[in-house]
Image (cartoon, rainbow, N blue to C red):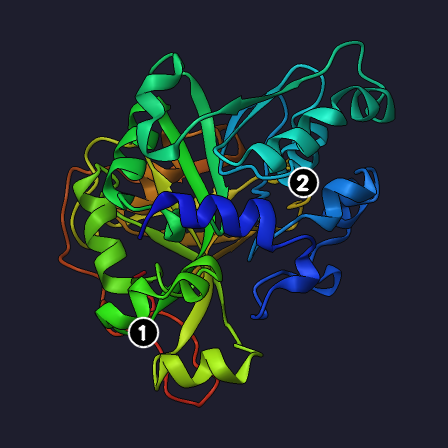
Amino acid sequence: MNIQVVKDYYGKTLQTSADLKTEACCTPDDMPGYVKRTLSNIHDEVLAKYYGCGLVTPVALEGARILDLGSGSGRDVYALAQLVGAKGEVVGIDMTAEQLAVARAHVEWHRQKFGFKKSNVQFLDGYIEKLGALGLKPASFDIIVSNCVINLSTDKLAVLKGAYDLLKPGGEMYFADVYADRRLSEEVRKDPVLYGECLGGALYWNDFVTLAKQAGFADPRLVTDRPLGVTDEALRAKLGPAKFFSATYRLFKLDGLEPLCEDHGQAVIYKGGIPHAEDVFVLDKHHAIERGKVFPVCGNTWRMLADTRFAGHFEFIGDFSRHYGIFAGCGTLMPFDTGGGGGAAASCC
């Protein structure tokens, strides 16, 4: 797919999120209260041109340096800017001139709205497949986010590799995107409207997992997912039986992660203290860790907590001196909930 098609679709064809032909955009009902409050502080023009499919607001962001891939009109950048605070920084990258113009036009308006002495955001013109060409220092970001953009990329592996290089050790990529339950036909992938609507470029979920591992992210973790409806009948007919999902994954830049969930007899205790997760810390779809409760974990989950920004909020039980085999229930079925009573494999741990 020609990248100019994507530029034109998001710069000229779409004028507001109401022009989309899918149920991609999250509604306020899907959001935690604190995220809704950040959006209430964002300029109306920025909100009107939001085309994301999920939420990219993980917890424990105070003081973090964040990169937003495909930042568009800047909605997520301005939301995250409030969560990182005056000592943090959020950098947005986009290739669409019209979207960048909207984002940049309101930098000072948001600085005043947030009450910061100086702006903590910047927007760069560039391609997410060529992150190395933007002059950004390698291993300089705590978190990289993206909202319904990587599916539009013509070289998804290059995006993931570039993100890996820019993350600090222990950093994470936390992003929402659209995935398919199967590999799509050439006809679907080349349709310009389907591609612009984030459907034609959607990866088969298992191919995404393979690419993420090739880029260096050894154990991709699914955080949330929901079926994605296609409201336009003509587009639905072109897609045939393929099903689509909006899903959020988190990928950690960590050495020593194993291919599967291995049991070393370890456990963690969440001590609390993370804003917006005072009673329960959610690592991913299968790990909701209650404060004060001993929670058995595999070796990979241990590292995701012990070797990242979350370490100070946990007590750690055990080590890697013994191995007890793989956690029961580790499977390879589609991880998303279809709503039809079938479903994903059980949690690995």
To which residue does mark 1 refer? Answer: 181
- Name the foreground residue: 151 vs 58: 151
Q: Secondary structure at mark 2?
A: helix
In the shown orientation, is residue 151 left or right of residue 104?
left
In the rendered image, residue 22, in percent from the top left (x then y), is placed at 56, 70
Q: Pick the quarter of the image with the C terminus.
A: bottom left
Residue at position x 64%, y 61% from top? Answer: 26
Task: Choose the circle earlier in sequence order: 2 or 1.
Answer: 2
Residue at position x 65%, y 63% from top? Answer: 19
In the rendered image, residue 258, in percent from the top left (x then y), is placed at 17, 45
Mark 2: few, some, or many residues within 10 Å (few <14, many ≥20)?
A: many
To which residue does mark 2 refer? Answer: 75
In the shown orientation, is residue 42 left or right of residue 175?
right
> From what the image shows, is residue 189 above or below residue 10?
below
In the rendered image, residue 130, in percent from the top left (x then y), is placed at 32, 28
Q: What type is the residue that disc 2 sits on? A: Arg
> From what the image shows, is residue 107 above or below residue 29?
above
In the rendered image, residue 327, in percent from the top left (x then y), is placed at 22, 62
